[in-house]
Image: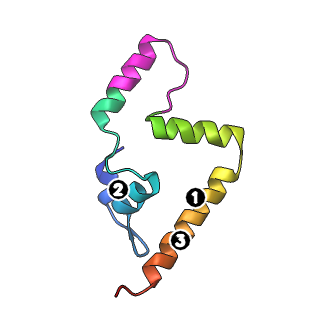
């Protein structure tokens, strides 16, 4: 979700906001208004669990089906980002 907390700092050489967006492989963020609408819809439907947006739901399901693999993929992503940051740009 796009909140100011992602703008609050850097993670080493990484801008938190951009690092998270790249990790999600998305051009946009899940808006607070959309989260509110989805939450109200889940309450109306008496849902015990809301995992949103769709990308997060897919990641959650994937992690439930193949525990550990999502963590390894995330670790690989972070390591690749670190490698890319260390290489000089021409």
Give the Cα distance between marks 3 and 1.
Answer: 10 Å
Q: Which residue is mark 2?
A: 6
Residue appearing at x 40%, y 87% in the figure: 88
Residue 11 in picture, x, y percent from top left? 43, 69
Residue appearing at x 64%, y 55% in the figure: 71
Labels in figure, total = 3
**Which numbered disc, 2 or 3, marks the residue that appears first in the sequence?**
2
Residue 58 in picture, x, y percent from top left? 55, 38
Q: Which residue is mark 1?
A: 74
Residue 81 in picture, x, y percent from top left? 48, 70
Residue appearing at x 70%, y 38% in the figure: 65
Q: Is residue 47 magenta?
A: yes
Q: Which residue is mark 3?
A: 80
Classed neighbour count for the residue bearing mark 1: other residues with Cα under 10 Å, few (<14), some (14–19), many (≥20): few
Give the Cα distance between marks 1 and 2.
Answer: 18 Å
As helix, strand or loop, the secondary structure at mark 2 comes to helix
Give the Cα distance between marks 2 and 3.
Answer: 21 Å
Residue 59 in picture, x, y percent from top left? 56, 42
The numbered disc on residue 32 is none
In the image, is 57 to the left or to the right of 9?
right
As helix, strand or loop, the secondary structure at mark 3 comes to helix
In the image, is 73 to the left or to the right of 4?
right
């Amino acid at each position: 979700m796009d909140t100011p907390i992602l703008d609050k700092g850097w993670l080493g050489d990484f801008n938190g906001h951009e690092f998270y967006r790249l990790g999600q492989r998305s051009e946009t963020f899940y808006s607070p208004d959309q989260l509110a609408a989805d939450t109200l819809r889940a309450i109306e439907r008496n849902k015990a669990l809301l995992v949103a947006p769709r990308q997060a739901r897919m990641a959650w399901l994937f992690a439930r089906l193949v525990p550990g693999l999502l963590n390894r993929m995330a670790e690989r992503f972070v390591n690749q980002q670190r490698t890319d940051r260390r290489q000089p740009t021409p």
